[in-house]
Image (cartoon, rainbow, N blue to C red):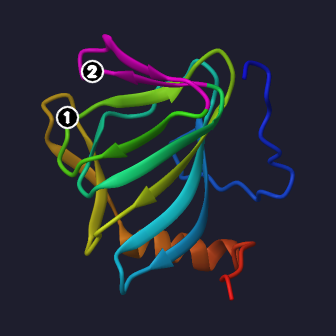
Amino acid sequence: MTGCKFDESNIAWRQLEGFDDLWFYVYNVDRKNGIVDAIFKFAANSRIALHQHKVPYITLVLQGELRFYRPNGEQKEVRPVGSYVVGVANGDPHIEGGGDEDVIVFFSFRNSEDVLFVFLDEQLKPVLPFSIGDFEEQLKAQGPAKWQKAA
């Protein structure tokens, strides 16, 4: 599906300070069931900070290709558009980024009680956790997500 573009015209992307190549939009935070659904956009040929997922998650690449790197910078994996992956909690620390074009990925974090993922320093020590509460704050700040519950 090379050249297929995700229509992001209705997405009010948000950014965190210090993450110039990463945007996100939160669709849902369901604290009762420990679920956070969001999409992330990584700039073309970018790499975001080293991190580790602390809860199970699902990803679906909607546009571009998602590239993974080991902590030493060596490329580990490439997930093209349409790739659906079920990830495990406490997997290998890694770096993610876009391929030759911006990549857009749907993430569904599961079984979350607190920290979803944590950014790490070069010694793999936790530096910045990102929790379900952080996503609740972002959802509140962005306003209601454009979605509805099925009847």
140 over 36 or under it: above or below:
below
Please state, as top left, top right, bottom left or bottom right, where the N terminus lies in the image. top right
**Between 63 and 83, which is closer to the camera in this rendering?**
83
Query: Quarter-wise, where is residue 42 in the image?
Result: top right
Is the residue marked by circle 1 packed among few (<14), some (14-19), or many (20+) residues within 10 Å? few
14 lies left or right of 138 = right
78 within the magenta span: yes
Please state, as top left, top right, bottom left or bottom right, where the C terminus lies in the image. bottom right
**Between 57 and 99, which is closer to the camera in this rendering?**
57
Q: Position of residue 81 (x, y in %)?
A: 61, 29
13 within the magenta span: no
Query: Which residue in the protein does label 2 denote?
Result: 70
Query: Which residue in the protein does label 1 denote?
Result: 92
111 lies left or right of 148 = left
Q: As shown in the figure, which amino acid type bears the numbered disc 2?
A: Arg
**Between 7 and 23, which is closer to the camera in this rendering?**
7
Q: Position of residue 9 (x, y in %)?
A: 86, 51
**Residue for point 63% across, 29% down:** 43
Residues at discs 2 and 1 in contact (Cβ within 8 Å):
yes
Q: As shown in the figure, which amino acid type bears the numbered disc 1?
A: Asp
CA–CA distance in space, label 2 to label 1: 8 Å
Stretch of the chain drawn in magenta: 65-81
